[in-house]
Image (cartoon, grey):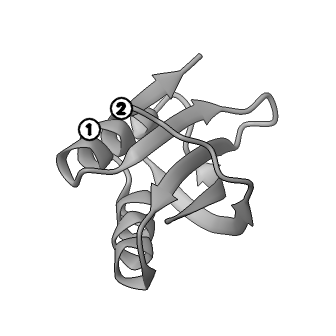
Amino acid sequence: MAVYRFIISGKVQGVWYRKFVSENAKKAGFKGYVRNLPDTRVEAVAEIENDERLKEFIEILKKGSPYSEVKDIEIEQIEDIKFNDFEIRY
């Protein structure tokens, strides 16, 4: 199990993006969070079991809500953090 941090840029604030990511990540069984950043980007952090699950999570981030437009996703592996669920942070 590894923990990854994703920074998503594009039209991702004020377009139901966090709600979409949170709902779909929960449905798929991911644990972590998603939140807006002050610079108009969005941060997501998730526990990922393997490469296949990483691809699945990235697809959720890429798809986004019908109103969003993802231009770029930066990915980095970070120190392990344990989560109980997937949530929207404010």
Residue nearer the viewer, 44 or 84? 84
Could you tell me residue 76's position as x and y percent?
73, 67
Q: Is residue 24 visible?
A: yes
Could you tell me residue 89's position as x and y percent?
55, 22
Could you tell me residue 29's position as x and y percent?
25, 50
Left or right, 45 with reference to 67:
right
Question: Residue at the spot x=42%, y=78% of the render?
Answer: 50
Q: Name above or below for residue 34 compared with residue 24.
A: above
Task: Kindly state the secondary structure of the residue where label 2 is placed.
Answer: helix
Could you tell me residue 69's position as x and y percent?
49, 56
Q: CA distance from mark 2 to mark 1?
A: 6 Å
Question: Residue at the spot x=59%, y=31% of the render?
Answer: 35
Q: Which residue is under mark 1?
A: 23
Q: Name above or below for residue 36 compared with residue 17.
A: above
Q: To which quarter of the image does residue 12 belong?
A: top right
Q: Residues within 10 Å of mark 1 (few under 14, many from 20)?
A: some
In the displayed image of the protein, which residue is found farthest to the top? 90
Question: Residue at the spot x=44%, y=83% of the render?
Answer: 51
Left or right, 73 with reference to 26:
right
Q: Which residue is under mark 2?
A: 19
Q: Residues within 10 Å of mark 2 (few under 14, many from 20)?
A: some
Task: Kindly state the secondary structure of the residue where label 1 is placed.
Answer: helix
Amino acid type, mark 1: Glu
Q: Which mark is residue 57?
A: none
Residue nearer the viewer, 80 or 13? 80
In the displayed image of the protein, which residue is found farthest to the bottom? 51
Amino acid type, mark 2: Lys
